[in-house]
Image (cartoon, grey):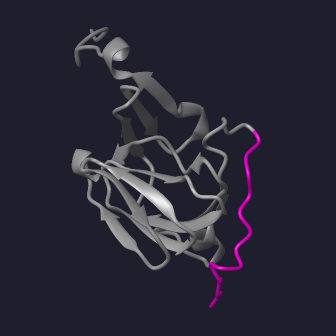
């Protein structure tokens, strides 16, 4: 058995993340030996978000570990603090964005049954992302620009 302390996890930052989305992430679920569920701890500095407003087709959960964050969902914006737990259902009703407007860093844990292939929809930018399981096949398309008929190009 491998025990991981989520409070001691050291998130890694990706220098290519754009301003407003520079959060660190630690894959604590994988580090603990998990293969089925996706469990990550995010460190959110001031004025940063985990990801753009989006929804997926799998249930996802948020647990605030420290600090305060603002959750945007289809009903508006909601402040959350340590110990607050939220479930995002599959589909549009589970759309969400987690941000830190506070003056101190915050830490949250997000977990889901997410596995590849996966699809995420970004309502604000009218995009769809598809992650089939191989990095080279990943695609992000504009829905309005990229819509095609199922039979287009087929013989």
Q: Please give the name of the residue rendered at 45% of the width and 50% of the height, measured from the top-left corner.
A: 116
In this rendering, is residue 134 above or below 40? above
Residue 132: say if magenta: no
Q: Quadrant of the N terminus?
A: bottom right
Picture coordinates of residue 96 (x, y %)? 37, 50
Instruction: Determine the main secondary structure of the stretch shown in magenta.
Output: loop
Quadrant location, the C terminus? top left
Query: 146 and 93: which one is in front?
Result: 93
Task: Work out whether residue 39 can be spotted.
Answer: no
Residue found at x 66% / y 62%? 105
In the image, residue 127 sits, relative to residue 144, either above or below, namely: below
Where's residue 149, x and y in %? 23, 14
Q: Please state the extent of the stretch shown in magenta in the rendering.
A: 1-15
Q: In which quadrant of the rendered view does residue 28 lie? A: bottom right
Q: Is residue 107 left or right of residue 149?
A: right
The reply to whether residue 22 is visible in this rendering is: yes
Residue 129: x %, y % from top left: 44, 34
| Quadrant in the rendering for residue 125 | top left
């Amino acid at each position: 058995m491998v025990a991981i302390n989520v409070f001691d996890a050291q998130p890694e930052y990706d220098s290519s993340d754009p301003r407003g989305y520079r959060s660190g992430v630690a894959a604590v679920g994988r580090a603990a030996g998990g293969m089925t569920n996706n469990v990550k701890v995010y460190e959110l500095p001031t004025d940063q978000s985990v990801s753009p407003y989006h929804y997926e087709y799998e249930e996802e959960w948020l647990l605030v570990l420290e600090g305060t964050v603002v959750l945007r969902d289809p009903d508006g914006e909601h402040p959350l603090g340590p110990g607050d737990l939220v479930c995002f259902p599959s589909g549009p009703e589970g759309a969400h964005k987690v941000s830190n407007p506070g003056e101190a860093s915050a830490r949250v844990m997000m977990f889901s049954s997410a596995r590849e292939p996966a699809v995420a929809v970004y309502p604000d930018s009218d995009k769809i992302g598809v992650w089939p399981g191989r990095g080279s096949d990943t695609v992000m398309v504009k829905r309005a620009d990229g819509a095609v008929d199922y039979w287009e190009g087929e013989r």
